[in-house]
Image: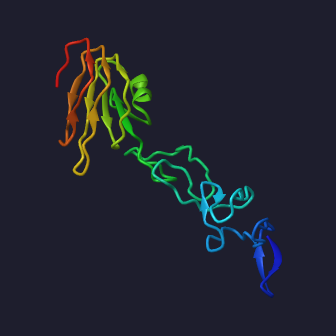
């Protein structure tokens, strides 16, 4: 970095200076700047310097709360947790003893085949999804939350289970096939 003067002394920084408060950014000087998704909340319009290496503070969606970078979840552990940002994927799909991880029920159902086992891993649930494959769907209820099924269109012989308990079936499901609950 560059050596620059501040408050009568010197410090190592990367040469970025806030145009509003005229403070040096340094690497990540959160005491002078409170970064929120790439913007300093103390100074409107000041964006996080792209050439500075951020240590990343991840939110539950895998987005850095400091610089706004979205994790691409390139490396997943066996349990579907990103090894970079620690985000839990939303669904697992097991077909022929091979498990893959997906975000979004639509994406999970696209990856599934007849006979697949689809499991909810986070308390995330979107509506208006069509089940068109004969799968087992595990609602996987949680101790402190109650995932629910609602607004879905069922067009295949789906077996719905709740391996943990605590989830519930809800309203507005259109069922056009013989299903097991």
Instruction: Residue 150: give x, y in percent of width and height.
Output: 29, 28
Q: Is residue 110 left or right of residue 67?
A: left
| Residue furthest out toward the top | 176
Q: Residue at 17% of width from left, 21% of height from top?
A: 180
Q: Is residue 164 left or right of residue 116?
A: left
Find residue 54 and report its image quarter.
Answer: bottom right
Number of marks in picture: 0
Q: Residue at 76% of width from left, 76% of height from top?
A: 12
Q: Is residue 156 left or right of residue 65?
A: left
Instruction: Residue 144: give x, y in percent of width and height.
Output: 24, 51
Whether 113 is drawn above or below 15: the answer is above
- Color style of the picture: rainbow
Q: Which is nearer the eye, 74 or 56?
A: 56
Which image quarter holds the C terminus?
top left
Instruction: Residue 52: give x, y in percent of width and height.
Output: 72, 61
Instruction: Residue 77: give x, y in percent of width and height.
Output: 43, 47
Which image quarter holds the N terminus?
bottom right
Q: Residue at 24% of width from left, 27% of height from top?
A: 171
Q: Is residue 79 left or right of residue 86?
A: left
Whether 166 is drawn above or below 180: the answer is below
Whether 151 is drawn above or below 67: the answer is above
Whether 76 is drawn above or below 135: the answer is below
| Residue furthest out toward the bottom | 8
């Amino acid at each position: 970095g560059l050596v620059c003067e501040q408050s009568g002394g010197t410090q190592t920084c990367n040469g970025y200076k806030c145009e509003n408060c005229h403070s040096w950014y340094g690497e990540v000087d959160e005491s002078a700047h409170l970064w929120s998704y790439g913007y300093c909340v103390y100074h409107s319009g000041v964006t996080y310097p792209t050439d500075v290496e951020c240590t990343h503070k991840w939110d539950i969606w895998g987005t850095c709360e400091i610089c706004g970078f979205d994790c691409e979840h390139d490396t997943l552990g066996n349990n579907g947790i990103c090894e970079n940002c620690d985000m839990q994927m939303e669904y697992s799909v097991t077909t022929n003893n091979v498990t893959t991880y997906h975000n979004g029920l639509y994406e999970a159902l696209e990856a599934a085949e007849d006979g697949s086992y689809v499991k909810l891993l986070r308390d995330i649930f979107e509506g208006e999804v069509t089940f068109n494959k004969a799968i087992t769907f595990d609602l996987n209820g949680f101790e402190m939350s109650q995932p629910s099924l609602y607004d879905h269109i069922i067009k295949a012989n789906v077996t719905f289970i709740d391996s943990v308990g605590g989830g519930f079936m809800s309203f507005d499901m259109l069922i056009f096939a013989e299903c097991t609950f």
